[in-house]
Image (cartoon, rainbow, N blue to C red):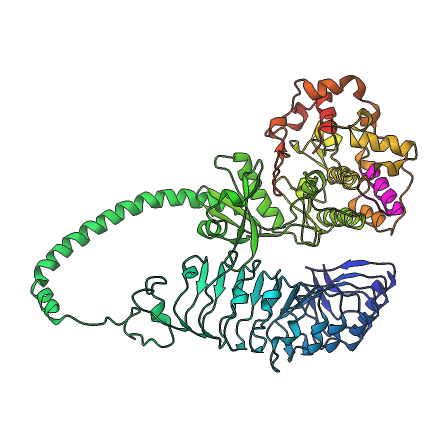
Amino acid sequence: MSGTLPAFIGNLTRLTYLSMGHNEFSGSLPKELGNLKELNFLAIGSNNFSGTLPPELGNLAKLDQLYMDCSGVGGEIPSTFANLQNMLIMWAFDCPLSGKIPDFIGNWTKLIALRFGGNTFQGPIPSSFYNLSSLTVLQITDIYSGSSSLDFIRNMTKLTELSLRNALIIGNIPSNIGEYLMLKTLDLSFNHLTGQITSALFSIDALTNLFVGNNSLSGPLPLQKGVKLQTIDLSYNYLSGTFPSWVTTVGMLNLVGNNFTFDSSNSSLVPGLNCLQRNFHCNNNSPRCFPPTVDIEQTVNIERKKNQTGLIVGIAVTLAILGFILIFLVFYTRMKRENNDAEVLLGMGPKPKSFTYLELASATKDFDPSNKLGEGGFGPVYKGMLSDGRVIAVKQLSLGSNQGKDQFTNEITTITAVQHRNLVKLHGCCIEGTRHLLVYEYHENKSLDQVLFGNRELHLDWPTRFNICLGTARGLAYLHEESRPKIVHRDIKASNILLDTELCPKISDFGLAKLFDDKKTHISTGVAGTIGYLAPEYAMLGHLTEKVDVFSFGVVALEIISGRANSSTNLDREKIYLLKWAWSLHESNQSLGLIDPTLTEFNEIEALRVIGVALLCTQASPMLRPPMSRVVNMLARDREIGPVTSKPSYLTDWDFKDTTNSFMKGDIVTTSSKRSYIGKNSQYDNATDLCPKVDPLLCPVNASQLSDIIADGR
């Protein structure tokens, strides 16, 4: 979207969530935004706004999340922002904010994440930040004037990420740094730190990435190092002494530009490093070090044998060139074939970042089985860490999988064209010969199905479950109605919804997605997806519209509030099929009996609203299912839910009582052995084409299979 933001947006006074990120809006932010006093989420990042932040935004007393990174908004942060006492997260990097960092931010005691960077702020960093004891993420970089010590962080012992790069920090590393037990990433590079590196810093168990290069630190290296600390940059300081034994066990280590001592006992530990120290005089005519001596007699002997050596060398060089040409021709033919494969795979649409296979092998420790997250139809998925400290999930295409290669291409084409808070982010891919890999952001809470149906180590309370339903609906509404062309996911299910650290849902796995022309009412295609989530008209006739995703969402919503899969033979007979049970409870005015018994507290009004929406979404006729934008409005209470009286025909027409045993034990015409939900399901699992390469009207999905679709679940 483009153009200026209209002033009448201030009339939406009941609005609680407003996300305008990743558009092309321009002009100034209207002051009328200050009328949205119920707003708790505002995102204006990645736009072309200009001007300053309206002081009226200080009226949004309920605002707890503000994202304005790359928005174009500049100037000083208004003093009225002191009223935003409920602020939890504020991102404001890569936008021209200026002036001093306001002292009143130190009064936002609920703040858990603050990111400033790429601005023109002046120091010092306010000492009032001492009060922000709830912070887990703090990034303040590129301060232009006014130095600060690290005294203001002494109460921030909950930090997991601290980045104060190029922030004019002076003094010593705090003596209590060992108390920051959850710290994973520390970046204090390009500052003016002095003193020694305390051993307590290297002993933090959680620390994985340490960057303190370009300071004035001195003294020896600590003798011990935490096991997880695998990325260390100590370059361009004044460190001295010899090397402890751990220097050979670190994945990435930068020690150049220091004053370390080298002798016969340690020069081989880090080869070549002695040439890159402050006190070493290098040879200007050669990239190598000065040779210690020159043997004159040996030089004379070499000169005497010059003619004989020249003849031998000439013959050897000629043979080597011929051999090289032959080898080149062989590899050229092979590489041309592999490059053609890559061109076919990436020949359309925007291209993501390209990783080398060596990068990903290093990130996953050569695809160590201990890093394996799971495996689906596409192939195995591994956890890894890039050299910059980012944790990733690497999906590896199994060799010889033609279906997987199609999904690989489709996923790149689809997901690189869309960006939304509730869609998983693709960092890039790797295509080298027969190796095809996708690189995603990693979510440590994994997928929704593992939380709901797994060992339940992570308990989801009612507000979290409701927000997962709402966030998933928003992601689908974006795909269906805001993306151009619109996208039908085709495989919405609990295992394809990931949960980030804040338990925000992220729709993943676009391998089966279809781009949908607005001019077409529907398309006919081979049936693909996961049984238990397929809409009837799609399962039987291959009739595809966005209402197929709406149906799947309704099933997922019922799973979220009930805490169970859409079918389970371990339950009483009347509860085996979730949809059928939900309708039975609805018809007897006992819908709240569907709620997960582990939820001791829940909002009854919201619960009934979610159930009502789910029953509308799973209607037999796609015409009776609401679009996802209306689903969002109904969940957010911006639109009332009409009476749900039409029981789906697929529940009334099929006689489950007589056929349950045959569904469970008989031979059914499906590819159930290839279903996407398997034992230890990967968080990036792939679904199955139920009838690949077959005309949809000839697809062998009969009445028995439709019942299986409803019955089998997950």
Residue 463 or residue 636, whichever sits in front: 463
* Extreme residue toward the bottom, this view: 146
> Do we see residue 375 in this rendering?
yes
Q: Main secondary structure of the magenta part?
A: helix
The residue at 62%/32% (across/down) is 689
Residue 638 lies, with reference to residue 152, above or below; the image says above
Residue 709 at what x, y percent from top left?
Answer: 72, 28
The residue at 52%/78% (across/down) is 194
In the rendered structure, the answer to whether residue 365 lies left or right of residue 242 reads right
Residue 606 or residue 188, whichever sits in front: 188
Where is residue 118, by image quadrant?
bottom right
Residue 454 lies, with reference to residue 120, above or below; the image says above
Q: Quadrant of the C terminus?
A: top right
Magenta extent? 599-617
Where is residue 694, by image quadrant?
top right
Residue 645 or residue 80, whichever sits in front: 80
In the rendered structure, the answer to whether residue 61 lies left or right of residue 499 reads right
